[in-house]
């Protein structure tokens, strides 16, 4: 950045300028966040493909929990909010989990909605592998 024109002609006075660098986290151009009052996001219906669900989030000082709903919007037993393990870290690849479920194999190829509950955190992206 410069205070005057960037040209081959000399400027009057002492030129000043600076070089800057902006960085973004992977898939971090846009996020949705919530303060201590909390918030939720519900996806459109999607077909589960893969056995693991991952998120890109910053939940330091807060929590992020994921529940899985059936096609009618009802929580699926074992994948409900009470069973969801709280995420409390800041990483671009965090595996979602539930107390008694180690993966999503039981729901493979099923149409569901994902409901993300968060407070004092930022949510960037999710995917399945």
Image: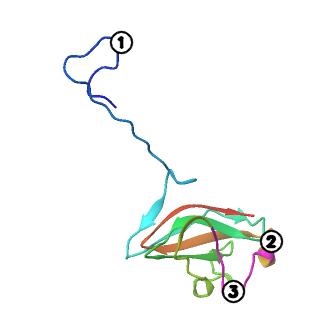
Cα distance in 3D space between marks 1 and 2? 63 Å
Cα distance in 3D space between marks 3 and 1? 68 Å
Out of 79 and 97, give the one closest to the viewer: 97
Q: What residue would you read off at disc 1?
A: 8
In the visual, does 50 lie left or right of 98? right
Of the numbered discs in the image, which one, if any, rests on residue 78? 3
For the C terminus, the quadrant is: bottom right
Q: Main secondary structure of the magenta part?
A: loop
Out of 102 and 4, give the one closest to the viewer: 4
Vertical arrangement, residue 3 with respect to residue 104, above or below: above
For the N terminus, the quadrant is: top left
Assess whether residue 100 is covered by the magenta stretch.
yes
Task: Report the mark closest to the observer, 3 or 1.
Answer: 1
Q: Residue at x 19, y 20 (%)?
A: 13
| View extreme (front): residue | 14
Residues drawn in magenta: 94-105
Task: Report the mark closest to the observer, 1 or 2.
Answer: 1
Q: Residue at x 43, y 76 (%)?
A: 61
Assess whether residue 35 is covered by the magenta stretch.
no
């Amino acid at each position: 950045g410069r205070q005057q024109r960037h040209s081959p002609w000399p400027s009057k006075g002492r030129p000043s300028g600076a070089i800057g660098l902006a960085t973004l986290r992977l898939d971090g151009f846009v996020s949705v966040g919530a303060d201590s009052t909390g918030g939720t996001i519900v996806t459109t219906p999607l077909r589960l493909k893969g056995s693991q669900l991952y998120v890109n989030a910053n939940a330091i000082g807060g929590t992020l929990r994921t529940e899985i709903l059936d096609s009618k919007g009802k929580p699926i037993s074992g994948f409900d909010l009470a069973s969801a393990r709280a995420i409390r870290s800041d990483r671009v690849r965090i595996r979602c989990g539930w107390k008694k479920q180690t993966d999503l194999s039981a729901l493979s190829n099923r149409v569901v909605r994902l409901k993300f509950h968060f407070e004092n955190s930022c949510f960037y992206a999710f995917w399945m592998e």
